[in-house]
Image: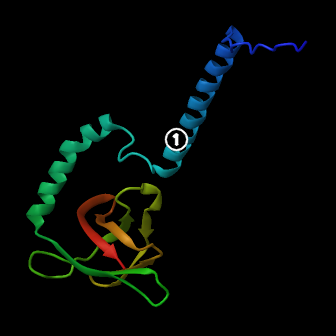
Amino acid sequence: MALLRRNKPYEVTGRTVLIWLFGFFAAVFVVNGVMVKAAMSTFGGVETTSSYKAGLQFKQEIAAAEQQDARHWKIDGKLTRNGVGDAVIDFSARDAAGAPLTGLTAVARLAHPADERLDHVIPLSRIGAGQFHGEASAQRGQWELLVDLYRGDDRVFRSRSRVTLQ
């Protein structure tokens, strides 16, 4: 006589539920870890380290901008590439009457609009009265060109322009 085998129905036990529960949360933690790693490696930082301090300096920035507008100074220049592929900036700074500005030092920076880790400070040298030249390596794309003019330690002029490097 042949024995009949009965298939036992599958039972969900406490152990099975525990394994599935741990497996679910392990998958959630792994995915969250991957997403946090991706976010931290692609985000270059915040615009300002302290919103409170930036808020306190806001009135000073407004006053500096009003003083700058009252001077009617102008910066004319160009940003190109040289034969090696470096970004080259040449500009002249003139007062309201068109005379070259003297006695100033200049600092230029190519600021990436989305990732401050890609920013480049462009070392500038004076090549004449109110004329400056600088070169830096920078990749193609959209940049914000910031040119600051200083008299001593005081910033007396800031030019901010959106530029595209080819």
* Residue 132 visible in the picture: no
Q: Which residue lies furthest to the top in this view?
A: 14
Q: Is residue 62 left or right of residue 11?
A: left
Name the residue rendered at 18%, 43% in the picture.
59
Residue placed at 91% from the left, 12% from the top?
1
Compared to residue 23, the image places residue 100 above or below, namely below
| Residue tagged 1 | 35
Residue lying furthest bottom in this view? 83
Q: Which of 165 and 74 is in front in this view?
A: 165
Q: Quadrant of the C terminus?
A: bottom left
Front one among 34 and 63: 34
Picture coordinates of residue 49 (x, y %)? 39, 41
- Residue sitting at the far right: 1
Q: Where is residue 51 in the image (x, y as percent from the top left)?
A: 32, 37
Left or right: 116, with 62 as reference point: right
As drawn, 113 above or below 87: above
Location of residue 43 in the rendering, given as x and y in whole percent from the top left corner: 45, 49
Q: Is residue 94 visible?
A: yes
Residue 151 higher or lower than 92, as above or below = above
Label 1 residue SS: helix
- Where on the picture, by quarter, is residue 70? bottom left
| Mark 1, other Cα within 10 Å: few <14 / some 14–19 / many ≥20 | few
User: Total number of numbered labels?
Assistant: 1
Please state the horizontal and vertical placement of residue 20, each as a whole percent of the image: 64, 21
Q: Residue at x 48, y 51 (%)?
A: 42
Residue at 44%, 66% in the rendered image: 120
Q: Which amino acid does label 1 sit on?
A: Met
